[in-house]
Image (cartoon, rainbow, N blue to C red):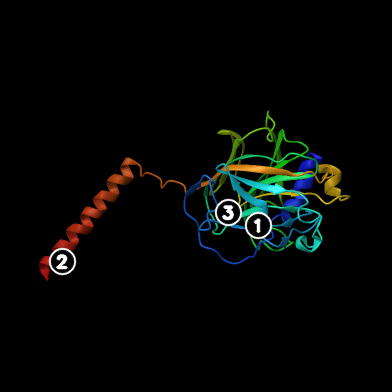
Amino acid sequence: MTPVARTLRSLVWLLVPLSGMAHATGSSFVDDLSGYDTSLWQKTNATLAPQPVDVAWRADHVAFASDQMYLRLNTWPCSVAAEQCGSRPNASGQYASLDTYGFGTFSATFRAASGSGVVTDFMKYSGTLNSASGPSDLIGMHIAGNDTSTLQLSFLSSTSGGLVTQSVALGFDASAGLHSYAFDWTSGSLSWYVDGVSVYSLSGVDVPDAQGRIVADVWAAQAGSGAASVLGSYTRAGTSAVFDSISYTVPAAPVPEPESLAMMVAGLGVLGWSRRRAARRT
């Protein structure tokens, strides 16, 4: 496991400072992110991420322009009004679904933020989201700004024995343009995709099984921390992750085999005949 992968493995527990309230189960959607859809999403606001994730989440750091969503990381207004950032030196944007989502395909098209000490995330996060103890179930895709040619995959389930990470060489600079990132999650299997090509798969008892929120964010590592020694020190230069779309698709209902379909039709016929016979008797 690379140093970046080990560091992201430890920090992913701290990434989602939201309430742990129960939410409805979400249905399929495609959001082209041309604007803020308050029926699907919320902007995390006035909340501190547990260190060494060294940012204050601010709603004004989630912005929409030119039919895209920008998650901005910079020092404004922290450098001039520290009280607005809880005395953190950095502010950033986090976008989280209102509902939770189960088995299906989760997809996002985005350009990762670049820069030393910076990480871009796209995740399904389950559990008490405001707890520093971390998620109970997780599926994640992460790109470190100091190594934007590598994708870090992560997953956690009740049987996986802790957060598991996997490094995948992308073959391109994820901060140079838009690319599609997705994971397809079913009961017993999990596959990750980049630009429609499978890059890693998992099957068996370790597959996550709890529905959770969809989360996108970008953050900076705390200066002088162990995380910064691996991810690099954030230089306080403004950067952003650009998301072009986010979607979720519920798995299609399986089509019955011809034999099963014939038996089902026959069964319905018998049921209808018995009801008609009973009606004649009465």
Indicate the amino acid at tag 2: Ala
Question: Looking at the image, which residue is at 68% across and 40% down?
Answer: 112
Query: Mark 3, mark 1: which one is toward the viewer?
Result: 1
- CA distance separating discs 1 and 2: 64 Å
Indicate the amino acid at tag 3: Asp
User: Residue 24 placed where, x, y %?
Assistant: 51, 62
Q: Nearer the viewer, residue 264 or 89?
A: 89
User: Residue 208 placed where, x, y %?
Assistant: 61, 51
| Mark linked to residue 278 | 2
- The quarter of the displayed image where residue 99 is located: bottom right
Q: Earlier in the sequence, mark 3 or mark 1?
A: 1
Q: Nearer the viewer, residue 3 or 247?
A: 247
- The quarter of the displayed image where residue 17 is located: bottom right
Q: Is residue 139 left or right of residue 146?
A: left
Q: Which residue is mark 1?
A: 59
Q: Nearer the viewer, residue 38 or 166?
A: 38
| Mark linked to residue 24 | none
Q: Is residue 9 left or right of residue 258?
A: right
| Mark linked to residue 209 | 3
Q: Secondary structure at mark 3?
A: loop
Q: Secondary structure at mark 2?
A: helix
Q: Earlier in the sequence, mark 1 or mark 2?
A: 1
Query: In this picture, is 14 found above or below 180?
Result: below
Q: Secondary structure at mark 1?
A: helix
Number of numbered discs on residues: 3
Quarter of the image for the C terminus: give it: bottom left
Binning the other alpha carbons within 10 Å of mark 2 as few (below 14), some (14 to 19) or many (20 upward) gives: few
Q: Earlier in the sequence, mark 2 or mark 3?
A: 3
Binning the other alpha carbons within 10 Å of mark 3 as few (below 14), some (14 to 19) or many (20 upward) gives: many
Does the residue at mark 1 contact the one at mark 2 (Cβ under 8 Å)?
no
